[in-house]
């Protein structure tokens, strides 16, 4: 019996058999001759939260883009409430009550928050003019429900990644009569408190009859919020299980297809040098950072933890020369250095992986060599021309070292999975031969297997003498990787933790200032 057939007979709760709202019937999808979905059959029920999991490249994003009209299937069809439907574009999907919260933001930076929330769904007065006041008021109510203090007249360009995530969620929730809500990695930049709020809203929507497809790499969240869990691997449907009857370990094994799934974090390095390579002394950025001081040692993995808005990303951007200093100083090797722009930081052998992979990281329309050599291109110029052979040769080195999965090095990055895009992004910075590497949310939106690879790469880089700073909203990532952790709150460092003090309770105490506080 196929997994889809099994899923149809499985009950979400005793005595309850929910009506099928969406049927995925033999869906296949090919890109440049490469099959990324292979005869997927799946029934999704009305009023359920269906978890969709799998490694990067398993076909999750392709499947939800087909459901939401962004891609067209190469073979197969969709049926909504038992009737075959054609969804040629995203507008048609919205008209059918299908809304998508994408993993990579689909926002217009030059528009305000409320204008983005109602983009394509604007409210007009009888005169035909936009009713901006009503849209502002509804946006305020929606963001208050999400407990996200974002000003609706603020430009999206000025928001943090977490705030942009909430705007995307608000945008989808504002679609009236939404029958199917697809959420692609909605919690990757949110704190546990914000996740709890989001889950409460999801449960309310479910109780009102809405169906939610929840794509996530956080298996504990899938276990907590979902009724059933669908696993894809290599474009094929592997299983559909009741969430309360499958363990997280089993989900991971089904995703990777190996019974010998390993410990995700490598052993922490024990021989870190006392040699300080980077010092920040009383760094101040007006209204954002206040008297921030820290040190980074050669070959260590240093963590920065804190709640959204604590100033971690802003601190990294300041060190990188992307934000001007109002006061304080930055020293490299004990010497004051100018970091008035990113080029200064690159010259000082500092590299920075932004948390905003799409907006500030990879170039979706460039191929692998073009992305990898974007910063180091001058090293490939010979007699005024780009040495394409050398560029391609170096690309193959990174593809092999980082196990980048791409059908061709000339594939545009938009066709690679999130995990493979992140590896390309990391390769770009390593091609600058950095001595200090700042990684902001390095595993955002990538699967457990790719995470394990990224952690191993970071560990190997530190062992080779590269000093790494890891900024992460995932507590287990900070605890599992770092030998020291600076905790930030409201633009200040509140504590530096080492050894056994790097634990959930102490990090949260210093991040919130409220003893016994839980994320």
Image (cartoon, rainbow, N blue to C red):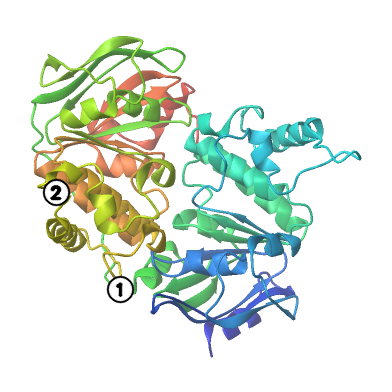
Question: Which element carries disc 2, helix, strand or loop?
Answer: helix
In what quadrant of the picture does the N terminus appear?
Answer: bottom right
Q: Position of residue 198 (x, y in %)?
A: 61, 45
Q: Residue furthest top?
A: 327
**At 67% across and 41% down in the image, what residue appears?**
117
Q: Position of residue 259 (x, y in %)?
A: 30, 73
> Can you tell which mark lies on residue 427?
none
Upstream in sequence: badge 1 or badge 2: 1
Question: Would you place residue 278 above or below residue 412 in this image?
Answer: above
Question: Would you place residue 207 above or below residue 275 in this image?
Answer: below
> Can you tell which mark lies on residue 258?
1
**At 10% across and 21% down in the image, what residue appears?**
333
**At 40% across and 42% down in the image, what residue appears?**
474
> Can you tell which mark lies on residue 380?
2
Could you tell me how far apart the alpha carbons at marks 1 and 2 are, in whole angstroms? 40 Å
Q: Residue furthest bottom?
A: 1
**At 60% across and 79% down in the image, what residue appears?**
7
Question: Would you place residue 128 above or below residue 309 in this image?
Answer: below
Figure quadrant of residue 183: bottom right
Question: Which element carries disc 1, helix, strand or loop?
Answer: loop
**Left or right: residue 518 compared with residue 118:** left
Few, some or many residues within 10 Å of mark 2 (<14, 14–19, 20+)? some
Of residue 466 and residue 273, the one placed in the foreground of this image is 466
Few, some or many residues within 10 Å of mark 1 (<14, 14–19, 20+)? few
Q: Position of residue 355 (x, y in %)?
A: 39, 40
Figure quadrant of residue 252: bottom left
Q: Is residue 265 visible?
A: no
């Amino acid at each position: 019996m196929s997994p889809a057939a099994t899923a149809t007979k499985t009950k979400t709760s005793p005595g309850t058999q929910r009506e099928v709202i969406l049927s995925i019937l033999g869906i296949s999808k090919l890109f440049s001759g490469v099959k990324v979905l292979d005869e997927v059959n799946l029934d999704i029920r009305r009023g359920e939260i269906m978890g969709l999991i799998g490694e990067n490249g398993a076909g999750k994003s392709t499947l939800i883009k087909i459901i939401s009209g962004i891609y067209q299937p190469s073979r197969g069809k969709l049926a909504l409430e038992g009737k075959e439907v054609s969804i040629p574009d995203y507008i048609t999907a919205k008209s059918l009550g299908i809304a998508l919260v994408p993993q990579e933001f689909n926002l217009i930076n030059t528009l305000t928050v409320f204008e983005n929330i109602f983009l394509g769904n604007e409210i007009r007065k009888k005169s035909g003019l936009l009713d901006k006041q009503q849209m502002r008021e509804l946006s305020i109510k929606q963001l208050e429900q999400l407990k996200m203090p974002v000003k609706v007249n603020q430009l999206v360009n000025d928001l943090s990644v977490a705030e942009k995530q909430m705007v995307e969620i608000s945008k989808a929730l504002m679609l009236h009569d939404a029958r199917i809500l697809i959420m692609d990695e909605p919690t990757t930049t949110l704190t546990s408190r914000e996740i709890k709020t989001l889950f409460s809203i999801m449960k309310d929507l479910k109780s009102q009859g809405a169906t939610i497809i929840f794509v996530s790499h956080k298996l504990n969240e899938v276990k907590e919020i979902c009724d059933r869990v669908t696993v894809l691997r290599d474009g094929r449907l592997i299983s559909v299980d009741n969430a309360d009857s499958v363990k997280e370990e089993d989900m991971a094994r089904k995703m990777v297809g190996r019974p010998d799934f390993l410990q995700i974090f490598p052993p922490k390095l024990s021989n870190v040098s006392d040699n300080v390579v980077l010092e920040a002394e009383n760094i101040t950025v007006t209204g954002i950072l206040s008297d921030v001081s820290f040190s980074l040692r050669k070959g260590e993995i240093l963590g920065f933890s804190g709640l959204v808005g604590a100033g971690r990303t802003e601190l990294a951007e300041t060190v990188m020369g992307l934000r001007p200093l109002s006061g304080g100083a930055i020293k490299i090797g004990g010497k004051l250095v100018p970091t008035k722009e990113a080029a200064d930081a690159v010259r000082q052998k500092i590299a920075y992986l932004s948390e905003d992979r799409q907006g500030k990281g990879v170039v979706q329309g460039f191929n692998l060599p073009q992305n990898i050599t974007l910063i180091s291109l001058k090293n490939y110029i010979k007699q005024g021309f780009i040495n394409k052979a050398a560029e391609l040769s170096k690309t193959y080195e990174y593809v092999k070292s980082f196990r980048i999965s791409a059908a061709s090095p000339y594939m545009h990055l938009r066709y690679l999975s999130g995990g493979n895009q992140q590896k390309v992004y990391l390769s770009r910075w390593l091609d600058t031969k950095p001595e200090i590497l700042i990684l902001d949310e390095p595993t955002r939106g990538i699967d457990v297997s790719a995470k394990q690879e990224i952690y191993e790469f970071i560990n190997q880089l530190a062992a080779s003498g590269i000093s790494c700073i890891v900024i992460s909203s995932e507590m287990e990532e900070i605890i599992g990787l770092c030998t020291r952790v600076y905790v930030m709150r409201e633009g200040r460092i509140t504590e530096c933790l080492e050894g056994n003090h790097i634990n959930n309770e102490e990090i949260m105490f210093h991040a919130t200032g409220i003893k016994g506080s839980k994320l």
